[in-house]
């Protein structure tokens, strides 16, 4: 339901921080100004949000989405399968899409993510060139839709757009998409006949435009590696823009010596790596029915080396991933179970790590940080990831932008008769259901 939010705030009262402190958080102009013991800070009632002991976390940021593809699975009805089959199913459907259809699905997906706590999204948008034979008008349908949605969500969500140029997308189509106000240059060079040549082509466009780059990189368990070529190419580029790579699945199957070389190049160039567990776990490994590989990048090696790492969901309910809850807690949970990270590390990758790779200002309960938060009924980070409580309060730049309340009714268990008491007959009324408001 769309309501009367947002509501500007000066104070978050009685917030539980991950370190166990119960605090008040003062906010001014969208920025945290003070964090103090509970009960010591004050503001007018209409600009105060009482969290009543809810866990206050830095709001998640989604570093790699595909809003133009989201929520299309029910229409496409794609076969289950690997990356190749997903690309084929999407390409067939993409030829039929309108700007309005793309915008409607993208808007619905973005608002679902906002309700779940995500206040910033970087989304790729396809340059819809077909096999290179589309008109400029056809090629820019997705970009026009997402530029529209970005304007509609301004002030509620930070939405950053990446031009996803496939190997067949002519440079003129990429330039036309960028002319609409798309923020970054992207592509999938590993799908090209000459992957490194396609890296060079896309980087040349970014250099001409003075833009950052976010490439899909090495999204396979075997085959060529392009990430090190990309990293070496941008090592001396200006640092006032972001350079990142999503997927990087191939790193997870490299031998230690080769892996160390690639990680060293990535670190030297300060290229952020974005891991996408739910989609890569789904797409990778179909050809390995025995000892199926995880299909993730090498998280521990990257983190231990000091590489900036982020995590996202990637696709949601489209040919590349038929499921997904639009929830960063789902991503964090997969990082724990499949990526073997600690819960704190996992949540860091969907919040602070994601914001870093996206080039966003730091957020959280620290003076000077942006007031972007999600508050949930949980005792700590592990509890929040494990249970993903549905009841949530979402604050973006100091404004309450989403609130979800849940009421749960659970039947009470049968009473256990005390020793020496006859069991109740079948006709004995059972106790009334227990009711619980979970906020």
Image (cartoon, helix red, strand yellow):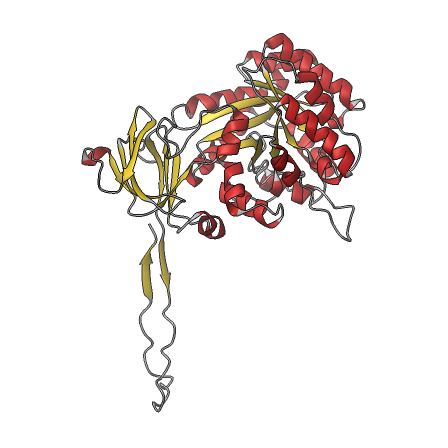
Q: Is residue 161 visible?
A: yes
Quadrant assignment, res 171? top right
Position of the N terminus by quadrant:
top left
Residue furthest to the top in view is 208
Residue 410, given in percent of the width and then of the height, sits at 38, 64
* Tally of marks: 0
Q: Is residue 431 above or below residue 250?
A: below
Residue furthest to the left in view is 44
Quadrant assignment, res 421? bottom left
Residue 76, given in percent of the width and then of the height, sits at 63, 38
Looking at the image, residue 146 sits to the left or right of residue 410; the answer is right
Quadrant assignment, res 175? top right
Q: Which of 439 and 126 lies nearest the eye of the viewer? A: 439
Residue 319, given in percent of the width and then of the height, sits at 64, 39
Residue under the point 59% across and 13% down: 238
Q: Which of 262 and 99 lies nearest the eye of the viewer? A: 262
Q: Is residue 288 above or below residue 252?
A: below
Looking at the image, residue 422 sits to the left or right of residue 317; the answer is left
Q: Is residue 132 visible?
A: no
Q: Is residue 204 above or below residue 166?
A: above
Looking at the image, residue 79 sits to the left or right of residue 359; the answer is right
Q: Which of 259 and 243 lies nearest the eye of the viewer? A: 259
Residue under the point 37% across and 49% down: 377
């Amino acid at each position: 339901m769309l309501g009367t939010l947002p509501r500007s705030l000066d104070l978050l009262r009685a917030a539980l921080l991950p370190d166990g402190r119960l605090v008040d958080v003062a906010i001014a102009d969208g920025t945290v100004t003070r964090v103090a013991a509970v009960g010591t800070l004050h503001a007018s009632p209409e600009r105060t949000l009482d969290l009543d002991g809810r866990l206050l976390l830095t709001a998640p940021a989604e570093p790699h989405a595909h809003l133009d593809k989201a929520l299309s699975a029910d229409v496409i009805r794609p076969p289950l399968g690997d990356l190749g089959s997903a690309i084929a199913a999407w390409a067939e459907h993409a030829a039929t899409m309108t700007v309005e259809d793309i915008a409607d699905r993208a808007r619905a997906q973005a608002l679902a993510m906002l309700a779940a706590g995500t206040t910033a999204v970087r989304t790729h948008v396809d340059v819809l060139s077909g096999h290179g034979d589309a008109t400029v008008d056809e090629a820019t349908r997705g970009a026009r839709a997402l530029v529209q949605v970005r304007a509609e969500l301004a002030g509620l969500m930070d939405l950053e757009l990446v031009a996803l140029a496939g190997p067949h997308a002519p440079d003129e189509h990429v330039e036309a998409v960028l002319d609409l106000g798309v923020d970054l240059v992207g592509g999938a060079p590993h799908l090209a006949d000459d992957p490194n040549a396609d890296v060079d082509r896309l980087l040349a466009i970014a250099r001409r435009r003075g833009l950052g780059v976010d490439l899909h990189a090495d999204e396979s368990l075997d085959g060529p590696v392009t990430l090190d070529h990309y990293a070496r190419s941008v090592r001396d580029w200006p640092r006032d823009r972001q350079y990142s790579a999503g997927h990087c699945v191939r790193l997870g199957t490299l031998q230690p010596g080769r892996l160390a070389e690639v990680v060293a190049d990535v670190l030297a160039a300060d290229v952020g790596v974005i891991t996408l567990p739910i989609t890569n776990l789904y797409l990778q490994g179909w050809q390995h029915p025995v000892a199926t590989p995880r299909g993730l990048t090498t998280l521990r090696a990257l983190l231990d080396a000091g590489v900036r790492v982020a995590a996202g969901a990637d696709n949601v309910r489209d040919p590349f991933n038929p499921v997904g809850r639009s929830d960063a807690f789902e991503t964090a949970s997969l990082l724990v179970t499949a990526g073997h990270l600690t819960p704190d590390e996992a949540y860091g990758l969907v919040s602070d790590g994601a914001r870093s790779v996206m080039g966003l200002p730091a957020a959280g309960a620290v003076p000077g940080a942006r007031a972007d938060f999600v508050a949930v009924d949980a005792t700590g980070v592990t509890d929040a990831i494990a249970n993903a409580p549905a009841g949530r309060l979402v604050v973006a730049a100091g404004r309450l932008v989403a609130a979800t309340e849940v009421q749960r009714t659970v039947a009470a268990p049968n009473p256990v008769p005390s020793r020496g008491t006859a069991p109740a007959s079948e006709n004995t009324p059972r106790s009334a259901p227990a009711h619980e408001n979970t906020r």
